[in-house]
Image (cartoon, grey):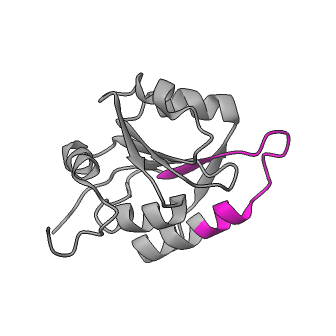
Amino acid sequence: MLKTIPSIINSELLTILAEMGHGDDLVLCDRNFPAASVAAETTSGALVQLSGTDTTEAARAILSLFPLDGFVPVAVRRMAVVDDHAAVLEVHRAMQDVVDAAEGRAMEIEAVERFAFYEAAKQAYAVVRTTEARPYGCFIFKKGVVFD
């Protein structure tokens, strides 16, 4: 066991987070996302399964270790609701709270059309699938720089 690392961060995920560099993307998705097929096309080909957790809890743990990119206009993207791209669901509001708290400031989360999201996810470093039951609980985080 290691101190200060959230217990839901398993060794596989910890390795991936450490391997990733500035500008690399990490997909955090719900149980409905085609995680295995998308992960097969990512840089690492890795799919990490986090059973028994939702995207909010997983993001809180990940973002305690993972800096978001401050050099891009938007470091967090989410899958937009089909036929209502402006819709902000409860899962999106919950993630907004987690992201803002992790960064200590208000952060924009950009909505991305479903199929464009899939294509962007394929360009990521890896995919982390949770057992999130809320629909559209799919996000992409761009890794930033640690300055200290």
Q: Which of 62 and 131 is in front in this view?
A: 131
Q: Is residue 63 left or right of residue 75?
A: left
Which quarter of the picture shows residue 19?
Answer: top left
Which quarter of the picture shows residue 70?
Answer: bottom left
Residue 73, horizontal then vertical, whole percent: 50, 52
Residue 74 in view (yes/no) = no
Instruction: Please say whether residue 76 is one of the residues in the magenta stretch.
Output: yes
Residue 80, horizontal then vertical, whole percent: 71, 45
Q: In this view, does 131 lie above or below 32?
A: below
For image coordinates 38% across by 58% down, the residue present is 68
What residue range appears in magenta?
A: 75-94
Q: Is residue 111 left or right of residue 122?
A: right
Q: Is residue 141 above or below residue 8?
A: above
Q: In this view, does 91 lie to the left or right of 71?
A: right
- The outermost residue toward the front is 52
- The outermost residue toward the right is 83
Instruction: Please say whether residue 30 is one of the residues in the magenta stretch.
Output: no
For image coordinates 27% across by 46% down, the residue present is 22
For image coordinates 66% across by 62% down, the residue present is 91
Give the total number of marks visible in the rendering: 0
Q: In this view, does 80 lie above or below 113?
A: below
Residue 60 in view (yes/no) = yes
For image coordinates 14% across by 67% down, the residue present is 1
Residue 84, horizontal then vertical, whole percent: 84, 46
Q: Nearer the viewer, residue 18 or 48?
A: 48
Q: Is residue 86 above or below residue 45?
A: below
Work out which quarter of the rendered image holds the C terminus and state it: bottom left
Residue 17, horizontal then vertical, whole percent: 26, 50
